[in-house]
Image: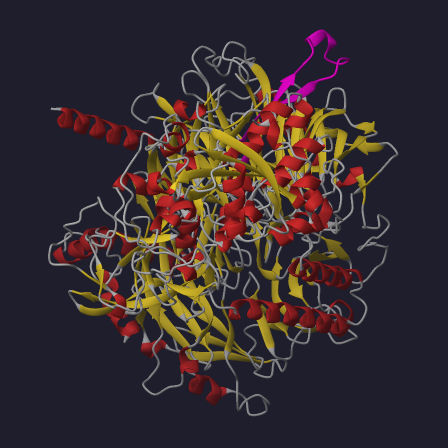
Amino acid sequence: MNKNHRVPSSRSLSAVEVKSKFGAEFRRFSLDRSKPGRFDEFYGLLQHVHRIPNVELLVGYADVHGDLLPINNDDNYHKAISTASPLLRLFLQRKEEADYSTFGTDSLTRKKNTVLSAVLLRPDVNKKKPPVIISLPRDFRPVSSIIDVDILPETHRRVRLYKHGQEKPLGFYIRDGSSVRVTAQGLEKVPGIFISRLVPGGLAESTGLLAVNDEVLEVNGIEVAGKSLDQVTDMMIANSHNLIITVKPANQRNNVVRSGGGGGGGGAASGSSGRSSDSGASYYGYSSHGAAASMPSHIIQNFPVGELESDEDDEDLVIEAGGEAEPIGRTASNYSMPPLPRYEPHLNLRTTNDSPSTFSVNANGTLPGSGSSGSLSNINASSATPSPDAAKERRSLEEEGTVITL
Amino acid sequence: MKRFRRHGHESHRDRLKQELFQFNKTVEHGFPHQPSALGYSPSLQLLAIGTRSGAIKLYGAPGVEFMGLHDENAAVTQVHFMPHQVELVTLLDDNSLHMWTLKGHNGLSELLEIGRFTLMGPPGAPPSVTRVTAVLAHSSGELLLLGTEGGHVFIVEVPGFRELEERNISLDQVASSVPDDYIGRRNLEHVEALQENPVQSNQVVVGYGRGLMVIWDLEKQCAIQHIPATQQLESMWWTEDGSYILSSHSDGSYCRWMVGVEDVNEEEEKSDIPYGHFPCKAISKIVQLPTREGPPFLLFSGGMPRASYGDRHCITVNHSKTQVALDFTSRIIDFFVIGDGPQHTGDPSALVVLVEEELVVIDLQSEGWPVIQTPYLVPLHSSAITCSHHVSAIPLKLWERILTAGALQNTHYSKKPWPITGGQNLASDPPQRDLLLTGHEDGTVRFWDASGVCLFPMYKLSTASVFHTDADPNENLNPGTEGEWPPFRKVGCFDPYSDDPRLGIQKIHLCKYSGYLTVAGTAGQILVLELNDEAAELTVEVKVVDLLQGQEGFRWKGHTRLDVREEPVQFPPGFQPFTLVQCQPPAVVTALTLHSEWKVVGFGTSHGFGLYDYQQKNNVLVKCTLNPSDQLAMEGPLSRVKSIKKSLRQSFRRIRRSRVSLRKHHVNKLQEANARLEAELAEMELAPVQRKIEARSSDDSFTGLVRTLYFADTFLSDSSHNTASLWAGTNGGCVFAYMLRFPPVERRADEPVSAQPAKEIQLMHRAPVVGIVVLDGHGAPLPEPLEVAHDLARLPEMQGSHHLLVISEEQFKVFTLPKVSAKMKLKLTAIDGSRVRRVGVAWFGSNRTEDYGESGLAVLTNQGDVHVVSLPHVKMQVQYPCIRREDVSGIASCVFTKHGQGFYLISPSEFERFSLSTRCVVEPRCLVAPPLHSGSFDQHQPQHGGPSSAPRSTQDGEDAESAARRVMEHALLNDEKVLQEIQKSLEGDQVSFLENNVKSAVA
């Protein structure tokens, strides 16, 4: 299977290799990357190659980060084609059997629920009554969320930014400032940290949850009071893979007003514990019916405490002498699973690079002269996702290790 | 029950922590930054230096040091010891006077401030009336005479600072008696100088700025004599027999006046402009000292011809027919002369000069007036410090060889012992010999004895001779031709002008067992040196190593490689280079390590790292770590700020080279450069202070920069065979491990050494890797090379599994070996926002139990805090604030010792030593006994030219009187009130018994 990924770089630029799975059957074909066509044509093609002309399908693909994402319109279809590297892996489900819970962040790799194996190996076991689909919220990856609404004062907001799996920059700046606190002695001016700028198109801006002049109170549960701007900067960057910041929004009109039940929703269901006081605010992903894939989606969700202490940053990448690449900290059961898409290039190294000389083509992007063209092309292909334009310019030297960016 | 047990365990651990760790800043080494005042007590034989930052430092015999800091952040402008007492008075820039004393406490002396005072004028008077310009500590020890800008002399009783208004010498009293024909009569200006008659202590001379000098009788409160000098007065000196007064003036002249002649229109007996004809600069201070036989010594500072040598800092010494103009490299602050004999009242023996950047002591009794080597106050920054390296517990053999090599370099120093010998050093001998090596911008490495309180220079290594440099060897700033006038002689070692910044030393590694040393510099040069007791003529073998490994598309825009001398070079005894590696591109060497047992050197730059076999003189391994999208790393280090620094340096150099040429022109250029620099700084400050929050990515700048290199004998491939290995950590959070294979010893010289890649770890958080340590089966750090062979460390535990500790700027992380998997970690940045800047493995001994100790990591963060992190469990033990976080250069300069001490630069010229250990503390412990008062003592003047203070003579009667007063004081202890006051002062409220005066001062 790994060998199939070894596509010459020239081809990987123009053609997309597609591997489509429906039930236990595979189909392989290729598409022209530059002319992908429309989604309904593609849908028809799928029905054709699988010879299931009249079956309603739910089309999903594994993106570069290992997430199972849906293809149901032109936009996300084009996105899927443009980011395929080099292989586009499709998973087809009958619409009436579809398990929507499989889509979303970490859906293919999450340790706790082995959805991938469920989808791949036992597609028919998980038969569920098709849920009432309102807007397919799980077609979309969460990029941010408001959390702990039930335990925070109403004037504060705890925002989680999902940097991992994102090409978007976090995209905000912080500054020093002063804020007024009520103390026993009366009002007192104290130094504080504020958001000073949002980068257009950045993650922070696109969520709509953070705004200029919001005061930063905590970073990942640690108060920033008494810390310098540089310290807070370093804390945020150190936590950037899973950044949770508690802010006091400058605009207090959009605050969440607690329902009488007092956090009755608990941690189980998403979004049950809060409600917006301002109907104009689109903090409910559910309510935005017409949300297209390109629109940000906001999901209010209570996260279990354990998730705040995510150990994702533990997964340092180790390459042993044989060229074997593996993330540290994964449980052994992961090894038996099909290769995870995001580690493909390194798994390729295992098969292609047995000699020490080629070993040093590595995630960090160094390139000794002896590196074989084959392994180089793999890396090229794997890194096609971030800023494709810039990547093309330096194609011959391109070797940045985005493959290990979580 | 469980909770109870754990609690018990924790309190045990807490107790253990107290036994192991404590934080102390112990002593400051080097030369005080920006000295502004000098004082000397001949009776205590102590030297005092005040600085612009308000510090006061006392030095006596080597090891005797005291330091005090004024609460006011004002410059110390004058320091005066009270004659024959342990008190001293300081005058600050803010016009406040402070009284300090050396108090005995637990058998040790401490420097304490015991009083402060500000002169108050009559209500409504302008501040200039009470602005103190001259201070005279009267020999009675009870009076301070304070001359002011308004021309008055106030008399104050000490130690209480009580103003004796009735005894003041007011300007009106003096002016009324001035002869009518004196041209300056209308305005005498400020009091420039005050001097006491050495033989008649009730007579003082008051010198006014306009030139008039008045001898005043303190008893009768009247003027005895007027000396009508007409030139602006700079200083005065009353000769030891009381018969002459010397005055120096702003036109470069000095005059000698006879004292005691009735005739008011006394003519000056002698007037001279020593460097005359053309206009001269002022003589700022003049001293004349007698010799038992023969003519006196005349010493004065300044007086140089204005146009040609006006920018030189000179002190002229004239004795008999010999005259020398000692030419210093920085501004003269003050000077004094120490006399011979047990009471230091004999012939002048040593001239002590404080200049802005160093202290120079000249032996006046040996032929040629050689310099006496200073045991302390050595200018660390004679060329700017670029890096430092500490080696603990040097074997005696190596120590002696370095000392011998150093002694050969110091033959030009005087053989005389150090003349300042006050106080007693009570510190026990240091338990071990420690060496601090500093690398400098001019390519030198200095070896300092860092075992004790005195940071003593042992040996200086220069690497510049290996290369051709910009400096023209024929250039001679001081040709010293016969009959040259003025007769200049260069003294002092402060020379901050580096001829070629590429020579700068960036990394040092010394193996204390083998005597091998490797130093690496700014232009990618790595020298391996060997200690040789003989001088030798050597050709240094050069190996150029291409770290880019054929990486294309890049252009190095930085400096070029250094040009190596191909002909054999004569090297003096000491460390002699035998092989040289030059990196290509010639970027700064950022990591360096030496393994003397394997005879290899590892080195790294921003482009990659390599391994060099210095036995076969062959490069074994090159690994390029460069990220191709990192253009910054490629372009080299030249930034705009750097180039301004360079141009400044060049203009300085030009000035030095052509002092004779028009000075103004250069000053203008300098001003221009300064203005430009300032404008740039202002521009930087105008930018709003905000920080970008962005995850680190692989194409950040300098991710390939090699931060640390480490050799380890450990389990790399399987858990049964240990192998030699090289580890490298980069700025991008990447760790590389190479397996090294060495041929058997007998074929070591012939068969190649091989290196094979074994492991590569990319830390997910991508923070720079600043340290790598392998822990043995017991969790102890692996010993240094040859340590086991010398029986100085036990064999590392090879049973049980080894662990790899990777220290990044953000986390401490322990991995298992040989299969690398994360075992435990300690997050730093994610928790408190600080980052690791410096880290060192140290051993902490318990102060309770002799044989108990623990290994730990001493860590300095970018917040300036020091932490101790335990090994092998990476738990935070203690945390202390150490350096201000704004002091970036201080934090960058920090170096840890193997026994829990550390050094960092508090100024370009001073190291602060601190200790994290309870057992290893090096701090001054010294005692200064109050001077004895015997009747026979001090018939003659005890002090030769104490800086701007009067020479003194005590008459028998007076002495007896003061002794009696002391007895009376003792008797007064029965008085309840006095006892209370003493009690108060003991309680730390030292000012309380001066309450009245302080109140008046504050009011």
* Among the 4 quarters of the image, the one containing residue A175: bottom left
Q: In this view, does B424 lie above or below B818?
A: below
How was the colour assigned to the protein in this rendering?
secondary structure
Residue A115 in picture, x, y percent from top left: 36, 34
- Of residues B905 and A166, the one nearer the viewer is A166
How far across and down, in percent of the image, does residue B811 sit? 43, 38
Q: Is residue B671 above or below residue B736?
A: below
Q: Residue furthest right?
A: B567
* The C terminus of chain B - image quarter: bottom left
| Residue B887 vertical placement versus A384 (above, below) | below
Relative horizontal placement of residue A282, taking residue A347 as reference (left or right): left
Q: For residue B751: magenta?
A: yes
Q: Is residue A174 magenta?
A: no
Relative vertical location of residue B930 with respect to residue B776 in this rendering, above or below? below
Report whether B159 appears left or right of A394.
Answer: left
The answer to whether residue B82 is seen in the rendering is no
Q: In front here: A391 or B718?
A: A391
**Residue B871: in sight, yes or no?**
yes
Who is closer to the viewer here, B59 or B972? B59
Q: Position of residue B610 (x, y in %)?
A: 68, 30
> Where does the image place residue B420, in percent across and percent down from the top left?
52, 45
Relative to A386, A106 lies left or right:
left
**Magenta stretch, residue numbers:** B734-761
